[in-house]
Structure formats: C-alpha cells, structure tokens
C-alpha cells in the first residue's frame, strides 16, 4: 500500500516537473538587478587590469569575441563565427554586422586588432596572446589573427574578461591605456550594459544598452553593483532580499547559512574556468623540502577530506592536480596520497631523517597570507607533528608581506591559492615551468621546481590543436607532476553564486559572474 | 598680548609635531615589507618582472627612500598629499570625498552618546543603588567591552534580518528616486544602525563619568542649600547639579574625538559606510602609501588642531587656567 502511494507521488511529481518544464517561463524584460561585489575595482577596463573586481562590471561593459557554455564549447558572441586553419596558425573572426559601441560608433575589425594589441602589451597574462604575430583586417567585419605557432588557448583567451573589445577611437588617443581616464569615467564599451555611475567603495550603476548587438537583450533595465566588503553584511543583505545576487562567495559559514535560508540558492557550479585551487607549496630547492620523499611524507600526513569536510564544512571539493576538476583537461587518475601516517613515517625514516629524543625529526616554517586560509594552516601543525615534523606557523599581517616573502623564495612551505584562468597555458604552466622561476614575482614558479620532461610536456600541450592529443599530453603532465609533488593540491576554493528566487537564468557556465549577464532576468 | 604669545608658541609646536608625524609615518609605512607593485600583482592574479618594474618606476618606488621622503614632504608643504596608486586620483580629492560621510557618522554618534550617556548617568546617580542604576552600569559595561564589529553585526541580524526595519549596508539606496527630502530620509535611515554601533562604546564612558560626577555634586553643600531652600527635585538636578557635573564629560568628549574617528574604521567596514575609515582600511590593505600617509596626516592635523582649540577655549573660559602661566 505504502509502495503504491509512493509510486503515485513519484509519478505525480514527474508530471509536475515535466509540466513545469513545458511551461518554462519566458524571460521578462525590465527591472533592476541588485548585485553585491566584494571589492572596489581599481578601474573598469579588463584589457589592462586582471582580477574579478574589474571582471564583474567589465564583462557587462565590454563584449568579447566569444563566450563559453557549460561544456567548455565556444559560442558566438561578438564574433558570429570563427575559423581555425588546418595548421592552426590562422584564426579568422567574423564579427556580428552592425554592432556598435556605447557611443554609437561601429565596432570594426580594427577595434579587435587594437584590443588584442592593448591586451598583449598591458595585460599581466602574457601567455594569452604571446604567439599572435599580427591581426589583419581585410574588411570591417573580418579579423584575421596570424600566429607564430599553433595556440589552442587562444579561443578561451577571447572570452569573458580576457579580451574585452575596446574602442580604438577612445583608447587609441596616445594616453597610457593603464591609466586612461576612460577606464573609470565615461567608459565607452561594447557590452550589454552601459556605465551610469562608478562611486568607489559604494556602487557601480549600469543601464541597459538599447543598441546591444543581440536583439532583445539584455533583459534587465539596470544592474546596481553594490560594493559590500564585509562578508557577514553581504550574507544578511542576501538573506533579507536587499541584494539579489552575489558571485564568488567563499566563506563556508556564510555559504551554509545561505543554503538554509528561504528564497535564495547557493550554486557551486560556474567556477571551472576560474579554477581556484588551494595548495601547499614547497620550496623544492631548500632543505629538507628539496627531498621529494619529504614532500610525499607531508602529503601522506595531510588529509584532504578532513579539510574539505571539517574545515571547509563540506563546501569545497578535493583537488588532486593543478588543473581544476571542472576542466575538460583534468586527469582524475593520479597519485592522490590518501592519508597514511605509517607510510609517511617510513618515507622519512628511509630518507634519513631519524626521530630525535623528543620524537621530532626537523623543523619547518609554514606561511600563509590571508585570514581565509588560517584554519587549513593551523590544521597542518598537529597533523605533521604525528610524523615528527615540528611546524612553526608564520602568518603575515597582509597580502604584500606574504607576497614579498614567497616571491623572494624565503619560505619552506606555504598555503596558496592559484587560479587556472580557463586554459592551462594561462594559469597552470606558470607554476611548473622552469623558465618561469622569477624572483620577486608572485605566482610564478616560486617553488623553483624544474623538470625538463615537464617543461616539454607543457610546451607540446600548449601547441597541440587536436583536443584528444592535447588532453593526453596534459594527463601525462598531471601524473608526472603529482609524482614529484612541487605542490600538494588540497581543495578547490568553495566559490558559490548566491541568488534569490527572483533571479531567472542565473549565471553559470564556466565563467559564473565574470560573463555577460544579458540573459539574466527578474521574475 | 600674553594670549597672542601663547598662541604663536602653540602653533609653532603644532607645526613641528606635524612635521615629525609626517616623517615618522613615512618611515614606518615604508618599513613594512611589500609595496604597491606586490598588491597590484596580487590584485591582477599575477604579473611579470617587467610589469612589476614598470609599476615601481611609475610610482618612483625605485628611487632611494630619502629622495622619496624629500619629494613627499615637499609636496605636503605645498598642500599636495600625492596621488593614490590604487585609485589613480589625488589623495586630497579622495579625502575630501570621504570626509562628509565620516563627519556625519562621527558627529551623530558623539551626539547620541553624549545625550543618552548623560541621561543615563543622571538617572543612575539619583539612586546609586537602585535597580535602574545597576541596569545602566551593566549596559555601559556591555557596550564598552563588546567589540564594535560584533555589536554591528548583532544589530544587523536583529534589525535588518529578524525585524527588517533598517537597511544592511551603504549610505544611500541608489535604486530610490526622488528629491532632496527622499534622499535626506534615506541617508538618515541608513545612518541609524552605524550610529548606534559607534555610540555604544562612548555611551558607556559618558554615562559612567556623568554618574560619578553627578553623585559628587549631589552630595555637595550648595545642593543641600538648594534643597533647604525648598527647590523642586527636578530643578535641583537639572539646573544646579547637571551644569556642574557636565564639565568633565564635555572635556572627555573633546579628547575622545580622535578615538571616535578610529572607531569609525571598524563601523564603516561592517556597514559599508563610504567614509575615511573604510578608505583607510582599503589603502592599508592595498599598500597605497600616499593615501595611508594622507589619512594619517589628516587625522594628526585634526587632533592637533582640536587640542589647540580646546586648550585655547579653556583658557578663555576658565580663569584658573588662564592665570596659571
């Protein structure tokens, strides 16, 4: 009897769900979306400024040639179609006809060429457009990108905030684009929303671009981005409905609080391209972490699952390689160093680090740079004590202090968070390339890790145009690096997009809120 | 003439003190490891050697510290506090933009703390061992010892979430359209919780102080005389006792002004109040040296000028001080 009832309810639920889908509501035009962002951007032009603070408003103001769906497939945006030549050396973009900048002037292939040049010269991610030799402009709607070598990362580097199309007639006036006044006032963009007002530490107001090149979009009349730095205040504002949506929320306590709240959804999907991975980095040229067995012993002593479940309260997921688990290039089948204290002790004994009278083998300093990562740092100390490593935790009062220490290689181990930025060529290679050991530069190869084979694999994978072969090369790379362990990958940052029930078509895909919000509407 | 000489001497001291503050601040900020290039690199998710070198060159950070100090002091003497690295704007403009919000918050909080604090002090002084008095003491102790940001968040949870009558953050509701009065009430509405939070610390101080001095005054001879004259209780308390017991409170309020400004840093951060406090925090986190120095200079200026004025005012008002020197 009970079973029948259950069956009926299931059937009913199925009908209801399918019925619900059949009458999926049409997006509505109009309304003001109130978002919160966590920091004041230095300015709003992503061509010359990386980072999420600029990316959230920047991707609304400026359109990129492409956008990506959740399966990592490029989709038309400002380029209605594109073509990669057989040899991978020529990429042709066919722009949407009749597209205009916010000042009414047409968006032409010359602007695309100018934008690529500006990013190439000023953006910190030099690898994005490094192989671009020239951009030809045979006609106003065609841009032909010539490459010195095949560069499959190029398509991804033409999405989100990485290649905003900026007007040459504004930014090409001879002023330094990095400090151009039009980066924060009177911005002339190409995207779905226009700038109304940017008041630092208060808000950014955007309004609908009536002449946006996609018919009928965007759906919203206005977006108000309120700058709320305090996480608790943002959480309360989301709970009481003052704010409709917030991206990149990462405090486990606040996320779990919001998961329980009525009327809001906490969505972890959408951050695969950002690819934020928290890891324990080792100084691979300083004793004793220069010994791979010491690094492995430490890895066997640390429990990823404890970190994700107990410290991150179930909001984060384990990361076992340097490529985000959400990426199509991620290789799940690598040595994962599941916690095994006996093995860890054995490794250290064999490596010649005998325990002293006090049960300790040696001392290591563990750095961390910001408050959000304090708990995982403190977890390491008692955990490594179990295998006879005495850990001294050295916290830094602020980011520059930590950054100075690490970038000058003055550390044994440090907790760090590094972003993938979509393609390994942009955000992954830098950590492992021996040519990228550069003192004074944070998020370079500060581990001083050097392996010829790894370098070769990255070089080959960076140029491989066949997706399957590329994936195979990156698999080998991930396995090899996991075996040498210059860093111990621990977990992905628990970024969540929080949005109210009123928000239709919430952002997702691979770029979350650093993508155009032209499809978002208010119910 | 005597007064003028003292005034000149005082202003001279103040100028030397200010110069020392500038130099000391400059040295201290530059002693901290890391600089704006590190911050910008962090902000951008990485950078290259060339970019880092370029940033340092752009902001003159590659020059020796003494040269940097010299050009900074030179600039300050000409009224130029420098250019913010982070916001790419003149520091004087940044400070001027943020000042009104902080003044509004600080003055409201001080007034609230003074009025309520005095009131509570008077009430509890009249029956020092009554229930009300104990309650006031408890409240004062609580307000004084609870961390400001905690008080702020608790007020937010209570009055923005459980009983949603006040907005969570910011100074204005940008989605609101309307004229001057709409804006006025909107700002007032946003001001309530931050003001209460900031006032909570000083409320305690003022109420304790007022209670103590009120009790002392109430026990003095002239109050007994007033009672003997047959004056009503309210007349005695409000007209005779309060006036005399207020002077320590007012002196303290003047001295506390700088503390209110520093308390505003936390309150402004919790409530996203766009004032000097949140600017200070942001610029410290970003190692935006010119802005940090500018705010420190400005705060020092406020404190020094404030003390100078208090001093001079006391001289004018109180003959005992005037005759001392």
Image (cartoon, coloured by chain):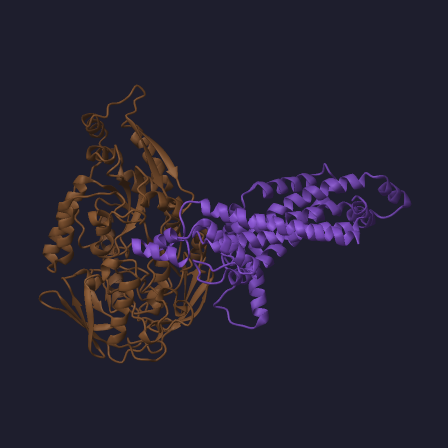
Query: With respect to residue A439, does A112 lie above or below?
Result: below
Horizontal and vertical percent position of residue A394: 38, 37
Chain B on-screen colour:
purple
Horizontal and vertical percent position of residue B246: 75, 47
Horizontal and vertical percent position of residue A290: 23, 35
Chain A on-screen colour:
brown
Image quarter in which the C terminus of chain A is found: bottom left
For this orientation, the residue located farthest to the top is A357
Q: Is residue B140 left or right of residue B159?
A: right
**Does residue B255 appear in the picture of this structure?**
yes
Horizontal and vertical percent position of residue A324: 23, 51
Query: With respect to residue A390, does A35 lie above or below?
Result: below
Q: Is residue B283 left or right of residue A389?
A: right
Residue sitting at x 60%, y 59%: B104
For this orientation, the residue located farthest to the right is B229
- Counting every numbered tag in the picture gives 0
The quadrant holding residue A62 is bottom left
Between residue B49 and residue A67, name the one nearer to us: B49
Between residue A291 and residue B297, name the one nearer to us: B297
Residue sitting at x 73%, y 40%: B212
**Does residue A219 appear in the picture of this structure?**
no
């Amino acid at each position: 009897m009970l079973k029948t009832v259950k069956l009926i309810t299931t059937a009913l639920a199925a009908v209801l769900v399918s019925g619900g889908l059949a009458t999926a509501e049409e997006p509505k035009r109009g309304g003001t979306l109130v978002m919160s962002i966590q920091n004041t951007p230095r300015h709003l032009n992503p061509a010359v400024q990386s980072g999420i603070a600029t990316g959230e408003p920047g991707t609304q103001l400026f359109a990129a040639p492409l956008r990506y769906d959740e399966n990592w497939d490029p989709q038309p945006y400002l380029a209605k179609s594109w073509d990669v030549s057989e040899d991978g050396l020529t990429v042709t973009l066919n722009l949407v006809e009749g597209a205009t900048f916010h000042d009414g002037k047409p968006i032409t292939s010359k602007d695309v060429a100018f934008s690529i040049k500006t990013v190439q010269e000023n953006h910190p991610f030099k690898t994005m457009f490094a192989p671009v030799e020239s951009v030809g402009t045979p006609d106003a709607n065609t841009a032909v990108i010539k490459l010195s070598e095949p560069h499959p990362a190029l398509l991804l580097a033409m999405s989100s905030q990485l290649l905003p199309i900026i007007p040459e007639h504004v930014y090409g006036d001879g002023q330094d684009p990095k400090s151009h006044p039009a980066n924060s006032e009177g911005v002339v963009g190409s995207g779905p929303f226009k700038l109304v007002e940017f008041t630092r530490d208060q808000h950014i107001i955007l309004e609908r671009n009536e002449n946006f090149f996609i018919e009928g979009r965007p759906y919203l009349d206005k977006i108000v981005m309120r700058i709320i730095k305090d996480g608790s205040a943002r959480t309360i504002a989301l709970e009481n409905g003052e704010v409709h949506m917030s991206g990149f929320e990462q405090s486990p306590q606040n996320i779990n609080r919001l998961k329980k709240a009525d009327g809001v959804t906490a969505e972890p999907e959408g951050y695969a391209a950002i690819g934020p991975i928290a890891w324990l980095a080792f100084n691979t040229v300083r004793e004793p972490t220069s010994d791979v067995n010491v690094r492995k012993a430490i890895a066997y002593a640390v429990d990823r699952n404890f970190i994700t479940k107990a410290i991150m309260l179930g909001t984060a997921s384990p990361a076992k390689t340097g490529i985000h688990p959400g990426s199509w290039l991620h290789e799940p089948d690598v040595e994962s160093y599941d916690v095994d204290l006996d093995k860890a002790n054995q490794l250290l004994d064999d490596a010649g680090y005998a325990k002293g009278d006090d049960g300790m083998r040696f001392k290591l300093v563990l750095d961390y740079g910001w408050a959000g990562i304090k708990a995982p740092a403190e977890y390491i100390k008692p955990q490594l004590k179990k295998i006879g490593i005495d850990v001294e935790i050295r916290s830094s009062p602020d980011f520059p202090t930590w950054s100075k220490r690490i970038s000058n290689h003055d550390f044994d181990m440090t907790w760090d968070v590094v972003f993938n930025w979509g393609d390994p060529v942009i955000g992954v290679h830098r950590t492992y390339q021996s040519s990228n050991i550069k003192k004074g530069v944070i998020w370079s190869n500060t581990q001083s890790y050097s392996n010829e084979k790894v370098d070769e694999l990255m070089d080959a994978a960076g140029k491989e145009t066949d997706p399957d072969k590329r994936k195979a090369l990156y698999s080998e790379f991930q396995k090899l690096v996991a075996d040498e362990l210059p860093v111990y990958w621990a977990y992905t940052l628990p970024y969540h997009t929080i949005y109210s029930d009123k928000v239709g078509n919430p952002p997702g895909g691979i770029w979350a809120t650093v993508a155009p919000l032209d499809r978002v509407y208010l119910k | 003439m005597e007064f003028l000489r003292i005034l000149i001497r005082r202003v001279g001291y103040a100028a030397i003190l200010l110069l020392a503050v500038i130099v000391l601040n400059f040295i201290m900020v530059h002693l901290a490891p890391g600089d704006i290039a590190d911050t910008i690199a962090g902000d951008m998710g990485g950078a290259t050697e060339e970019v880092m070198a370029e940033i340092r060159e752009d902001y003159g950070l590659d020059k020796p510290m003494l040269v940097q100090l010299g050009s900074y002091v030179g600039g300050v003497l000409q009224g130029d506090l420098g250019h913010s690295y982070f916001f790419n704007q003149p520091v004087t403009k940044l400070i001027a933009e943020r000042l009104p919000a902080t003044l509004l918050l600080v003055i409201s909080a001080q007034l609230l703390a003074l009025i309520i604090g005095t009131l509570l002090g008077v009430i509890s002084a009249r029956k020092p061992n009554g229930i009300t008095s104990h309650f006031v003491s408890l409240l004062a102790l609580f307000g004084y010892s609870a961390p400001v940001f905690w008080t702020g968040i608790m007020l937010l949870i209570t009055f923005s979430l459980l009983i949603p009558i006040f907005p969570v953050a910011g100074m204005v509701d940008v989605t609101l359209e309307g004229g001057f009065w709409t804006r006025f009430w909107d700002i007032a509405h946003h001001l309530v919780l931050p003001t209460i939070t900031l006032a909570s610390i000083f409320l305690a101080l003022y109420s304790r102080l007022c209670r103590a001095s009120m009790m002392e005054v109430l026990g003095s001879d002239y109050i007994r005389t007033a009672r003997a004259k047959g004056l009503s209780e309210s007349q005695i308390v409000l007209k005779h006792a309060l006036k005399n017991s207020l002077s320590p409170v007012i002196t303290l309020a003047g001295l506390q002004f700088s503390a209110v400004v520093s308390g505003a840093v936390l309150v402004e951060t919790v409530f996203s109040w766009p004032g000097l406090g949140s600017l200070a925090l942001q610029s410290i986190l970003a190692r935006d040296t010119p802005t940090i120095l500018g705010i420190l200079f400005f705060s020092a200026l406020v404190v020094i000028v404030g003390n100078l004025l208090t001093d001079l005012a006391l001289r004018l008002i109180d003959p005992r001080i005037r005759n001392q020197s």
